[in-house]
Image: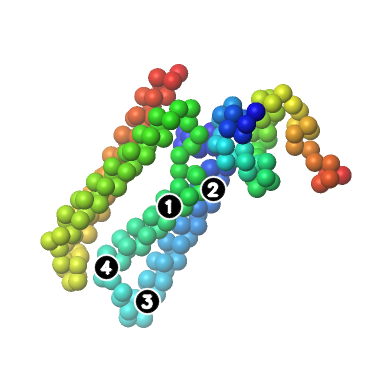
Amino acid sequence: MDRSGLDEMQQSKRNKIGNQCFLLLLYLLLIDGGLYGFGFRWVEYPANIMILLTLCSGIYVVRLIAANAYVGPNKGKDRTAVRTIMTSAAAVLTGLVVVYLLKSVDLVSKAGIDEIAAPVLFITAAVAITVAVTVGVLNRIQTRRED
Amino acid sequence: MSQKDLADAVGVTRQTINAIENGDYNPTIRLCIKICKVLGKTLNDIFWEEDTYG
């Protein structure tokens, strides 16, 4: 078992799903670029990239959970619970912040999308990094306690 | 011994043991050896299939 805590079958599933989602993202971006080349813009940049990234990462996480490759076989149930709670809290927090930010933004015009893109990307990344670091620290503390 | 007990003993999920039993997943030799040690059997006892390999 590696540091991710997944067993060998879960790791192989995670790798397979990751590769597929990466290729999906690549093809979607190529299609998006191709459409733009033909003069068709379905959503203004950078919202189109954000939507594609969110879609692919969402598919990745949902497929991981569906394939039972998100949380590994831990010795106790603590880590699973901590991880689930932290992920749920992060999802709710990110959702609330994004909704709050989007409330006052004009999503139809390019200027409005440009204005909100950077804060949304920054906040999402910040929340993800915070959660990852917190979960890592908690896991380390719990592992020491078990040893 | 249940699938869950064996899974806990070798450090994998119950789903992995189930997949191995059903032939849906080929375990690494490292996991095979762990399973054999836990069950007190040899690799031949558990993983050799006469019908398949003659």
Chain on which label 2 sits: A
Determine whether A11 is above or below A95 in the image: above
Label 2 vs label 1, nearer the camera: 1
Residue of label 4: A45
Q: Which of the chains bears the disc numbered 4? A: A
* Real-space CA distance between mark 2 and mark 1, rounded to the nearest whole angstrom: 13 Å
Looking at numbered disc 1 in the image, what kind of residue is underneath it? Val
Nearest-to-viewer mark from 4 and 1: 1
Regarding residue B36, the answer to whether it shows in the image is yes
Badge 3 amino acid: Leu
Chain under disc 1:
A
- Give the CA separation, mark 3 to mark 2: 33 Å
Q: Name the residue under label 3.
A: A35
| Badge 2 and badge 4 in a common chain | yes
Q: In which quarter of the image is residue A25?
A: bottom left
Callout 3 touching callout 2 (CB < 8 Å)? no
- Provide the secondary structure element on which disc 4 rests: loop
Residue at mark 3 shares a chain with residue at mark 4 = yes
Q: At which x and y percent is residue A46?
A: 27, 64
* Circle number at residue A62: 1
